[in-house]
Amino acid sequence: MQPRRSAQWYAGDDRNSYMHRAWMRRGLPADAFDGRPHIAIANTASDLTPCNSHLNEVARSVADGVHRAGGIALNLPVVSIGETQVRPTAMLWRNMAAMAIEEMLRANPIDGVVLLGGCDKTIPALLMGAASVDLPAVVMPGGPMLTGTFRGVPLGCGTDVWKLSEEVRAGTLSAAEFQRSESSMIRSKGHCNTMGTASTMGLLAEVLGMTLPGVAGTPAPDSRLLESAHATGVLAVDLVEQGRRPSDVMTRGSFLNAIVALAALGGSTNAVVHLLAIAGRLGVPLTQDDFDTTGAGVPLLVDLLPAGRFLMDDLYRAGGLHAVLAEVRDLLDPEAITVTGRPLTDHLDDARVYDREVIRPRAEPLRPHAGIAVLYGNLAPDGAVVKPAAASPHLLRHRGPAVVFDSVEDLHARLDDPDLDVTADSVLVLRGCGPKGYPGMPEVSNMPLPAKLLEQGVRDMVRICDGRMSGTAYGTVVLHVAPEAAAGGPLAKVRTGDMIVLDVANRRLDADVPAAEWAAREPSPEAAKSYAAPSRGWERLYVDTVGQANTGADCDFLLGASGDEVSRESH
């Protein structure tokens, strides 16, 4: 047996090993240091990350599994990012959380790690950090919440916030009724029950091979989640015994499988920046264009909000992730393995669909082509993305005059002005919302519609932004425009009245402005006034080093991996 990594701290009879052992012997027996695998439980539980607040309970079941398998379980609280809570945006902290997780895994005497996450940025950050240190690792997703109801109708958290708030602005729902829905929407512990970013990344963690097969999508209150947590603890010990690392599991084939699944599930556009960032830590060649070439022709099979009707506990009831993957099995790389050491496709043999309303047959999809479309043109030289499954089909080819907002504050100040020159054919353009400009690339691309158009019955318009949108959102929204305005991108040149041409079928996004005029036009000075200019701290480091959306918006100094070695003693 190869010496345990933790033995570098604990083995021996010198002063340093004495100190490492002595301070840990607060309930641990002497044989805890005899070569047993020490498994960290990287735990993002936090009361300020409400979707992860139940993870301490999950951690206890993981620890029971680790102990059953002969390992030593060690709770390791790590940076937690509450999507609904932190300002200016949770995305600003993803890279910082990943960096902190990586450093704590490397710095401590551990042999493997269980990664506990749920809320949007926590699973991506955990995977990024674990990929860079490359210790044996497995993800334990926290699971979605149960469905709440309001006035007898199921509520999709996030998605119905957008819908109900627009109805208030349209005058069709009272503010009092809107507030009454608040306590109905969040019915139980767990993350969003729509196919938002949290659900998407939990499911894709399994498709990447990084979870116990069959666990992703289990509702947070379901007792089977704790059963799976126990089994995940057992598996973590086996991963150390086998020496199986994230770099062995997450190969290019695994990422292409995730892109196929993203389309079939109707998953969040945020998966694009997260998968690119994780691949960048591993050195896996993955580009934004892979999402189009691999996923564009994949049918949408899952009828879930925001692209459909149902919610996550319906998906679990209908057969879950494996039932969906079985429908597109021929599109999956059969060589891509999971943390079990077996190919992902081997785990699909017993998959069954129990509700064909929720999970459609391949021959009768919700939409025949559901992948992410990547657009290029003079507005997006490095690309932009759109999710056709969440868009209005009649708007996927559109020409209309721009109505430009130089910042989120500008949008809020003018959007509902009755004198705003806007019609249903207009194209709303919001800039200054990219990684550098905001900073952190907030979820504001799904701009609210002008009140006067809502009153006319308009419920969708073409919207363009260099920011992101919530995975729970919907609409014809072109986002992740790169380069962003604050990085010198041409979005900074657009003026109100310019004709904007969107042609998703031909993958184009252009301002119909004469080339000579476009080249000579100066960026908006008003937009520049809103760009972030932090003087210190993480924000300063982030703005100075963050990449663009088309490469995953990771910081340049965090790309790649440093491994798990620590060469120097601490005493």
Image (cartoon, helix red, strand yellow):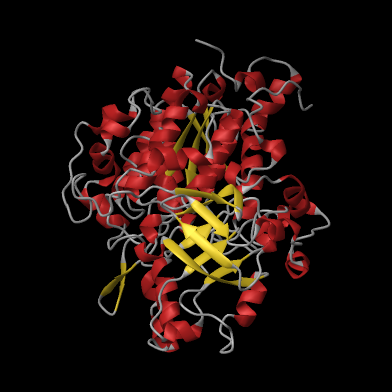
Q: Observer-nearest residue: 299 or 165?
A: 299
- Badge count: 0
Task: Name the residue: 66% across, 74% down.
Answer: 409
Residue 440 showing in the rendered view: yes
Q: Quadrant of the C terminus?
A: top right
x, y percent for residue 36 = 50, 21
Q: Is residue 5 above or below residue 312?
A: above
Q: Observer-nearest residue: 544 or 465?
A: 465
Task: Name the residue: 64% across, 43% down.
Answer: 554
Q: Is residue 244 above or below residue 100?
A: above
Q: Is residue 50 left or right of residue 361?
A: right
Residue extending farthest to the top is: 1
Residue 50 showing in the rendered view: no
Q: Observer-nearest residue: 125 or 28?
A: 125
Residue extending farthest to the right is: 535
Q: Is residue 518 above or below residue 71?
A: below
Task: Name the residue: 73% across, 53% down.
Answer: 488
Q: Is residue 106 left or right of residue 127?
A: right
